[in-house]
Image: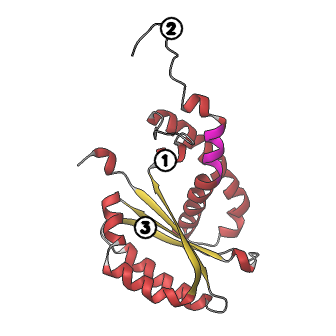
Amino acid sequence: MNPSQTHPVLMLVSRRAKPQHEAAFEWLMAEFITHAEAYPGCLGAQLVHPGDDASVDDMLYHALLAFDQPGSLAAWQNSPERAAGLAAIAPYIEGPETVRGISGLAHWFQAPSSAKPTQPPRWKVAVVTWLGIFPTVYLLFLLLGNLLAPWTLLARISLLTVLVVTIMTWGVAPQLTRLLKPWLFPAAPAKHKGQTG
């Protein structure tokens, strides 16, 4: 198997529960996630609830699932367990679901609007990933440290890792990619006149 196809993958699914049906939706999603976590290749799953101050229009739930490789994720997506779970949840959601797949850290730093998908060297991805994750984790600890202190270690790690992945994917990584684009994706040297490829 191609080594490039065996890296862990993440899938983030966002859904909006019908008003007055949040409790049933959350219970069914807990069952859904339990089945997902027991599925071969699943590295973990987590449901992120809307914030207490979220408006009605912002009442989105986010389910984050991690699998050891794309093949395991594909098997889960085609499984009868997933189909049954989605059928049970369907009456309690409204609007379309939003699905985003994240395949490896390098996909955080793909060249924007590139006709041909490219990825920077792994060491550059590692440096920029650290530049994004370090301040993100630091700020989350400052903001949520006291609030999460009574939680168990596993619960704290679960929430913080979900928040870090979400913030990196939609906030920090795209900004760092734009800021450091010349370094991540250096332009190929211009050929001299008369030089042929």
180 over 150 or under it: above or below: above
Rendered location of residue 136, percent (x, y): 65, 51
Left/right placement of residue 69 relative to residue 189 reads left
Residue 153 placement, left or right of 40: right
Label 3 neighbourhood size at 10 Å, few (<14), some (14-19), many (20+)?
some
Point 57% across, 42% down: residue: 112
Asked if residue 134 can be seen in this view, the reply is: no
Tell me which amino acid carries mark 3. Gly
Q: Name the residue under label 2.
A: 193
Name the main secondary structure of what is drawn in magenta: helix
Residue drawn at (37%, 81%), measured in percent from left and top?
Answer: 83
**What is the C-alpha distance between the residues marked 2 and 1?**
36 Å
Residue tagged by mark 1? 107
Q: For this rendering, which residue is in front, 35 or 156?
A: 35
Give the foreground label among 1 and 3. 1
Q: What stretch is highlighted in magenta?
A: 171-178
- Residue type marked 1: His
Mark in front: 3 vs 2: 2
Q: How far apart are marks 1 and 3 (CA)?
A: 20 Å
Residue drawn at x 50%, y 38% as measured from the top left: 125
Q: Relative to 62, is 53 on the left or the right?
A: right
Is 133 above or below relative to 95? above
Can residue 29 be seen in the rendering of this structure?
A: yes
SS for callout 3 = strand
Q: How far apart are marks 3 and 2 (CA)?
A: 55 Å
